[in-house]
Image (cartoon, rainbow, N blue to C red):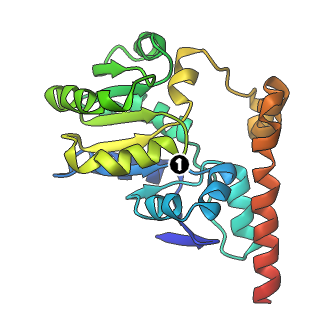
Amino acid sequence: MKKDILGLNIDDVTMEEALQIALSFTESDSAKTVYTPNAEIAMAALRDSEFLEILNRGDLVIPDGAGVVLASKIINNPLKQKVAGFDLASAMLKNPEFYDKTFFFFGAKPGVAEKAVEKTKAVNPHLKVAGVQHGYFKEEETQEIIDRINLLKPDVLFVGLGAPRQEKWIHAHKDRLKVKLIMGVGGTIDGLAGEVKRAPAFFIDHHLEWLYRLIKQPKRFIRMLNIPAFLWEAVKYRGKTR
């Protein structure tokens, strides 16, 4: 069931429920889309009607971030839990129910996707990867990339081009892609490759991943302001509906 969080329709699911939905998508006759908005992305969508519409057309839209879950509670339409996109993608790559599925990694800098595959295969030798493609391409190369993906026909396509670029790319081309599931994964490929370290357990457990990222990447400060901005929108919405 989807819940309206300030105009963004988010699926009210647990991690296990999201994983099972993703598994069911791999049996689909057409490409199903999975989007993973956190508070920063959600705020960007509120400012970009095209982006908001694309997210709302997603077949599975998970609350990737404590900020989205907190906003849902502020407006009295609470979501069950945070379902991080990195965790969902990682679960798909390691879950035995996905052993017979093939994956394609699309995104990150040249060489990073290959590294991500190598490290993931070290953990799960059963992983089947149809191919990889870095995210530093020219627009005129798009058709060639689509043709290559279609030739390999992976069940799952991970697109890590960063938001909102990846979601707009998926939306524009999903009907031409011969895949079952397309997921916007942001920096997941970098994370799997070890290029970007995940926050320590303490920060994750206390919903402070944003603080860890800010400490590690101070340049993200301006972008991070979208988190309190989104929560403020929730507070204002609650005030209007009382």
Q: Is residue 119 above or below residue 48?
A: above
Residue 53, can we see it? Answer: yes
Residue 70 position, x and y percent, is 74, 61
Give residue 127's quadrant in the image. Answer: top left
Residue 89 position, x and y percent, is 46, 35
Q: Amino acid at mark 1?
A: Thr
Extreme-front residue of the structure:
140
Residue at image coords 73%, 69% = 73
Residue 179 position, x and y percent, is 23, 40
Residue 55 position, x and y percent, is 48, 58
Residue 207, can we see it? Answer: no
Q: Is residue 74 above or below residue 203?
A: below
Residue at image coords 83%, 82% = 239
Secondary structure at badge 1 equals loop
Relative side of 182 to 77, left or right: left
Relative side of 89 to 45, left or right: left
Q: Is residue 161 above or below residue 123?
A: below
Residue at image coords 45%, 22% = 136
What residue is shown with label 1? 36
170 or 87: nearer the viewer: 170
Extreme-bottom residue of the structure:
242
Q: Residues within 10 Å of mark 1 (few under 14, many from 20)?
A: many
Residue at image coords 58%, 48% = 83
Q: Quadrant of the C terminus?
A: bottom right
